[in-house]
Structure formats: C-alpha cells, structure tokens
Image (spheres, rainbow, N blue to C red):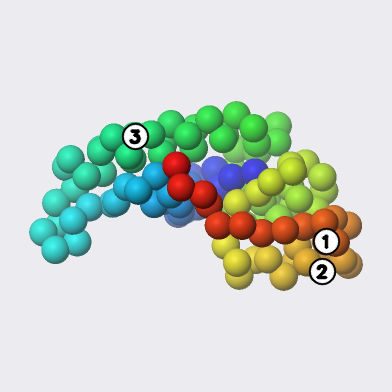
Amino acid sequence: AIYTDNSYDALVMGVENAIFSFGGELGDYATYKVDGIINSDQNVKALEAYKELYSFTPPGWAKSFFIEDNQAITENLAAMSMNYFAFFPALINEASNPNAKNTGFFANPPG
C-alpha cells in the first residue's frame, strides 16, 4: 500500500520518497530553479516506479494515506506498506495488528 490520496499532500509525500530514493531532487534551493531538476531522469524514473507500485495496491485503494496504509497491514490487504515512523506504534501493537509479531520496518532502498 502506498500513499494515493490526492486531496491533500499524501500523494506528494509518497512521490517525494520515491524521488529521493532515486537520487532526485525537487529543485535548487539556492536559486529556486526547478526546470531540469524536477523533470530530471531520476525523477521521471521515480514517478514511473511509483506508478508501478500503484498497480499492487489493494483494490479500490485510490485515496489512501497513513491510516489506510496501516489498515492495509492490519487487515491483511497488503504484505508491504509505506508510512512514516510516527504511525508505526499501531503496527507493533498486538491489540490493533494481528501481524505485529511479524511486522518489520525498512527505509526505502535506492532506486
């Protein structure tokens, strides 16, 4: 499960993770230049990879953010999910996650 909600910043937050994992940047923070950076080869590959990951999300999972991505794990809808560490406590709590004993965490690997 990945962030797919486009009504706030969830989708952007998910894509940013992919961009940084692929070695991309959002722009030049000193000059505020974005052309040639936001559309770099790394960023294009990151967006393509994120789009591919979307094909593996649970059916009907087109508006998900942190709550839904935890739900995907606790309800056995997905084997893996992206989320920020602040939302991990629910995943290691056996009362809320029947998979808590088998749940692990990792940082996004490089592209």
At label 2, which amino acid type do we have? Asn
* Whole-number angstrom distance, CA of label 1 to CA of label 2: 6 Å
Circles 1 and 3: CB distance less than 8 Å? no
User: Mark 3 or mark 1, which is nearer the start of the sequence?
Assistant: 3
Could you say where residue 110 lies in the image, as x and y percent from the top left?
A: 46, 47
* Whole-number angstrom distance, CA of label 1 to CA of label 3: 35 Å
Circles 1 and 2: CB distance less than 8 Å? yes
Circles 3 and 2: CB distance less than 8 Å? no
Query: In this view of the protein, which residue sits in the foreground, 101 or 89?
Result: 101
Q: Residue at x 87, y 66 (%)?
A: 94
At label 1, which amino acid type do we have? Ala
Q: Mark 2 — residue?
A: 93
Could you say where residue 54 lies in the image, as x and y percent from the top left?
A: 57, 34
Q: Mark 1 — residue?
A: 100
Name the quarter where the N terminus is drawn. Answer: top right
Q: Is residue 102 left or right of residue 66?
A: right
Query: In this view of the protein, which residue sits in the foreground, 41 or 47?
Result: 41
Q: Quadrant of residue 107?
A: bottom right
Q: Residue at x 70, y 32 (%)?
A: 59
At label 3, which amino acid type do we have? Val
Q: Which mark is residue 35?
A: none
> What is the secondary structure assignment of the residue under circle 2?
loop
User: Mark 2 or mark 1, which is nearer the start of the sequence?
Assistant: 2
Most extreme residue toward the left, as rendered?
Answer: 31
Residue 68 vs 94, above or below: the answer is above
* Whole-number angstrom distance, CA of label 3 to CA of label 2: 37 Å
Q: Which mark is residue 44?
A: 3
